Amino acid sequence: MSKLKDKVLGLAAFAMVIIVGMAITSNPTLKSKAAEFAFFMRQNPILGIVLHAGFSTAITVSGVPFSLVDLGAAWVYGFTASMGMLLFSKTLGSILCFVVARSVLPATRKSSVLAHPTVARVDRILASSPIYYGTLFRLAFLPAFVKNYGLALLNIRFRDYIVCCLIGSCFGVPAQAYLGSQLGDIYLGLRDAEDVAKSDPMLLWGGAAPALTMLVLMP
């Protein structure tokens, strides 16, 4: 009964994260600010790279499901350059998540989390092959903040943790960079999706697969 309850709560939490993420991303004010930042990056490319690194890293650490900053960067800088930008910011964010999980969270809180039967079982499995099972954890259908902080709270060395993060980024980062480079202006509200569907429907279909991949894998 407890396992069923955990699964139901997990699914409910994941659904809530998706709903919150959609609400934040579709918020007109935030979308307008993201579009303004995209134009700023276009006019100030060097400073834009620096600011994007700060914003994107902060978003990763905070756990807020807000992807418009990264999608806007991919739209401005293109697929190849944005991959490097996203990889840097996501990796730095993951490192800071590890530091927060290990140094900032109270020891009592960490102990209570690790004492949970499901978490304890995952921890035991992880110990048998940290990089293999840690990578599976990073690729799991879980919210990004659970992947970052959840893995960091388990008994895994920093070296293995960052390797798992980098392997996970090999899937999520290209997907997000491609999606932003192709459809970033639509997500920012600068172009209507219906117009694109009429002129080039394959472009929208081509963006569907990366969008799903990003939702599942993005660290």
Image (tube, grey):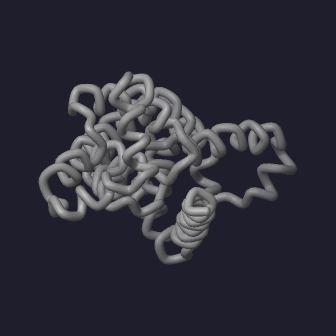
Q: Residue at image x 54%, y 65%?
A: 13
| Residue 202 shows in this picture | yes
Q: Residue furthest right?
A: 198
31 on left or right of 60: right
**Quadrant in the picture for residue 84:** top left
**Quadrant in the picture for residue 91:** top left
Q: Nearer the viewer, residue 203 or 149?
A: 149
| Residue 22 shows in this picture | no
Q: Residue furthest left?
A: 103
Q: How many marks?
A: 0
Figure quadrant of the C terminus: top left
Q: Nearer the viewer, residue 151 or 193?
A: 151
**Quadrant in the picture for residue 166:** top left
Where does the image place residue 74, in percent across and percent down from the top left?
48, 42
Where does the image place residue 69, in percent across and percent down from the top left?
43, 55
Q: Nearer the viewer, residue 157 or 202?
A: 157
212 on left or right of 90: right
Q: Residue at image x 46%, y 50%?
A: 118
Q: Residue at image x 83%, y 46%?
A: 199
Where does the image place residue 1, in percent across and percent down from the top left?
62, 62
User: Where 14 falls versus 196 (above or below)?
Assistant: below
Q: Residue at image x 26%, y 49%?
A: 97
Q: Residue furthest front?
A: 1
Q: Nearer the viewer, residue 78 or 87?
A: 87
Where does the image place residue 173, in percent across and percent down from the top left?
47, 35
User: Where 104 falls versus 79 (above or below)?
Assistant: below
